[in-house]
Image (spheres, rainbow, N blue to C red):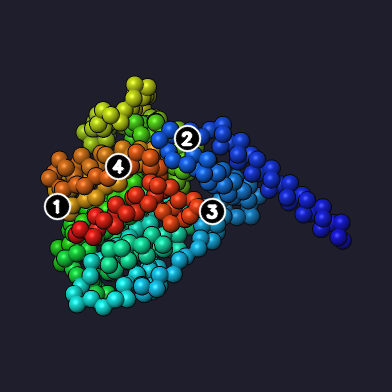
Amino acid sequence: MAVLWLVLLVSLSTFYLGVFIWAVIQHFLTVEIPSALKHPVKFRLLHCLMLYIITLGNILEKMKICSMVRFIQVFQDLIVIKKNHNLVVTNMHFGTIPVRLFQPKAVSSEGRRGIIFYHGGGAICGSLDCYHNLCSFLAQQTDSVVLSVGYRKLPDHHYPCISKDCLNASIHFLKNLMTYGVDPSRVVACGESIGGGAVAVITQALVSFQNLPHICAQVLITPIMQAINFRLPSHQQNQNVPFLTRDILTIAVCKYLDIDLSWKDALFNGTYMHPDTWEKYRKWLSSDNIPRRFKNKSLLPEFSRPFDEAAFMEIRHNSGSEVSPLLVDDKIIAQLPEAFLVSCENDPLRDDALLYKKRLEDQGVPVTWYHVEDGFHGCILLFDKQPFSFPCSIKIANAVASYIKGI
């Protein structure tokens, strides 16, 4: 019996080692490390670990033991939550939506600022626990009441669950601000990645709710603002830059929008795009709107391939404003509150932020833009994860807190 256990142990060890070696080889064959990035060795190590977890998840999914998405979610929930003795943290539900409330313990003679926070993770990962430390940081640094929304996500839920859950939770919070000690004139919507896109969707939707307190500012941290033009300069320049490589972005977009992965090339090459649709939206989506300094001479043209009608029928729902809030009408954009936009140079979503910045400014909405030359997608999550934090992580966290404190 002891021999059998030893054989099993050696076999498992060999298997896990082999998977890790495969992840390391894949990393060095496919990944580009930007020269501006600080601590490249640490960056490589983190990405190898990420590929290792994804590869294990794919193996388990093919063996029909566990879905890759579920496996990743199990790992993310192992994150260490730091207790902050200056805050009262309460878990609750708004209907069926789990939320987490962060309230400063210190007594205040007036209503505090409120922050509604939508986490990132591409509908694959991200959770209340995963973003707990960031929300705790924002609550303490800005002396605000923070509501973190735990919306539904993959693998059980698809589009439009994120926008629905975030909107319903936000409406409930806005109707009960006095209960939580929040000043109705100082409510901020804040989010990162897909949560940054949710900020835009929810802020736009709330324009029509005249009986609710208005959002006074929107904070969008490296947001995804559209799922149409994946030929923008930042997508081409950073398609192999962790942690949001083209492969990861493909999985996130296709799974959330319930598009079969066999259509991924049509989505990213633009062959699904009907010429009339492109003519309608190019004024907002074209790389012509991106400042020259963000372009290089080797860029491929946008939507230059023949139109594929079959692909169009499968993918056409990506042009709705709940998926692509960049495409909402000017009359709604003009009614939006001031914005704080964070973009990272080494992020495929960089140009989404730049395009939304232009749309807001064209309609007279005040915009504060914070661009991080050494930043990469998702880096803010590492702001307190020593020794895995990066200078850009801390810079963005402090910049967001500083902006919100000024409201």
How much space separates mark 3 and mark 1, taking CA atoms? 39 Å
- Judge left or right: residue 52 versus residue 112: right
The location of residue 256, given as percent across then percent down, is: 43, 49
Q: What residue is rendered at 14% in x and 52% in y?
A: 335
Residue that badge 1 annotates: 335
**Does residue 235 sit above or below 123 in this rendering?**
above
How much space separates mark 2 and mark 3, taking CA atoms? 24 Å
The mark nearer the N terminus, 3 or 1, is 3
Q: Quadrant of the N terminus?
A: bottom right
Mark 3 Cα within 10 Å, few/some/many (few <14, many 20+)?
some
- Judge left or right: residue 101 versus residue 7: left
The mark nearer the N terminus, 2 or 1, is 2
The mark nearer the N terminus, 2 or 3, is 2
Query: In the rendered image, is residue 273 in sight?
Result: no
Residue that badge 3 annotates: 72
Residue that badge 4 annotates: 371
Provide the secondary structure element on which disc 4 rests: strand
Amino acid under label 4?
His
**Does residue 97 sit above or below 321 in this rendering?**
below
Residue that badge 2 annotates: 33
